[in-house]
Amino acid sequence: MANGDSLVVSHSNDDVVDYGGAYRTVRGFSRAVFRFSPLSDTQCRGTFVQYLDVGGRIPSSVMVQQVPTQLLVLGEVMEVFKRDDEIDEAERRELARVVKDEPQVYTADENSLLSRVQGKHEALKDEDFEELEWPDHLVKMELNLQGGKAGVGRATTVLDAEIEECVAWELALVSRGQLKCRAYTRLWWP
Amino acid sequence: MSCIHKALVAVNSHNHVYYTANDHVGVLGFLPREFVARQVWRRRDAENLIIVYESFEHADYPMRSEYVRASCNTSFEFAKLPQVSGVPQTRVTFTAEIIMGGYIPNAAQKIGTVP
C-alpha cells in the first residue's frame, strides 16, 4: 500500500469441490485481513482482523469465548519471528553503558533515600545474622531477626561478570524475558 | 509466587518507580500483594555501586481492594573483585526487609522472609 503497509487477505468461497468422499460438515465462512505496518528497519506491527461465521446455531456468548483462540494466529506469527533475547541483550548493554559512562546528578531527595535505606542496612550487626542452610554453597543466605519488623534477609554471592553488567540485569526489571515469565520465582524481592 | 503485573517508570536514568503485583499461589486465603517502590542506583566509587528500593505512595498506583499493599526496604550492593582467569568478578549482596501487609503473625512473616 502507499503508506508502506502490506496486506494479506483471505476469503471463503462457496465453490463445490469433490474431495473424493462424503463428509458431514457444516460450511462456515471467514474473511480475514493481516496488515503489517513497518515501524523501523527491523520491526513491524501486525494486525489481524477476522469476520468468522462458523455456521449452524451457536450462541453468540460461546463465539465470544472463542474469539481469542481464533485471533491467536497472530501470536503464532510473533513466536516465529520473536527476537526477545536479542532485544533484552541490547537493552541491558545500553543500561550498562549508562551506568558505566553517563555522569549522574542526584537531588537531595534521592540522596536522602539512598542514605536512609543504606543506613538501615549498615546499622545491622553482622553477628546478628544467622546463616541459613541453603543447597547452593555459592550463595550465602542469612537472616537477622533483630532488624526490622519482619526480620531482614541477606544473600551474598559472586557473579562472573563486570559490575555494570550485573547492575543492568537488576535494572532491566521489565525486559521482555522478565515480563513473559509469569511464574516469576525470584526469592527475596517480590 | 507468580507476577500478575509489573511496571517500571523512569523518573530519570538513575531513579525509577517500580510497581509489581504478585499472586502467592498455593497459600490459602492469601490475597495478592502489590508493591510500589522507588528504585535509585548510585555509584559509590569506581568499584562499588548500590541499588536501593523503598516503598512509597504514588498517585498513579492507588490502593486496590483486590490487593494488599505490602512494603519493602531492599538494597543490592555490587563490589568489583579481582578477575579469576581473566573472568571479571562482582560480589553482590542483597539485603531485604519485606512487610507483606495484612494480618500475618510476626513469626510467620519471619519464616516468609526465608525462601
Image (cartoon, rainbow, N blue to C red):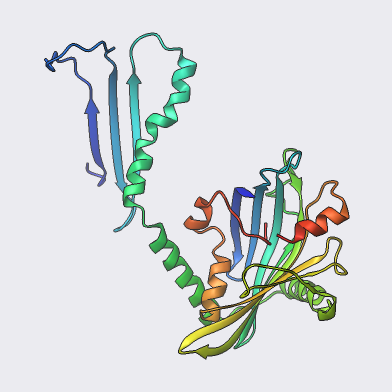
Q: Is residue B1 above or below residue B113?
A: above
**The image quarter in which residue B89 lies:** bottom right
- The answer to whether residue A34 shows anywhere in this view is yes
Q: Residue A106 at what x, y percent from top left? A: 67, 76
- The answer to whether residue A45 shows anywhere in this view is no
**The image quarter in which residue A146 lies:** bottom right
Q: Residue A18 at what x, y percent from top left? A: 11, 15
Identified at 76% across, 49% down, the residue is B69
Q: Residue A117 at what x, y percent from top left? A: 77, 71
From the image, which quarter does the C terminus of chain A lie in? bottom right
- Could you tell whether A135 is left or right of B98 in the image? left
- Could you tell whether A81 is left or right of B108 in the image? left
Q: Is residue B45 above or below residue A183?
A: below
Nearer-the-camera pick, A181 or A135: A135
Identified at 62% across, 59% down, the residue is A186
From the image, which quarter does the N terminus of chain A lie in? top left
Identified at 86% across, 56% down, the residue is B107
Nearer-the-camera pick, B112 or A3: B112
The number of callouts visible is 0
Nearer-the-camera pick, A103 or A172: A172
Residue furthest to the top: A57
- Could you tell whether B87 is left or right of B26 in the image? left
Q: Residue A160 at what x, y percent from top left? A: 51, 79
Q: Is residue A67 above or below residue A156?
A: above
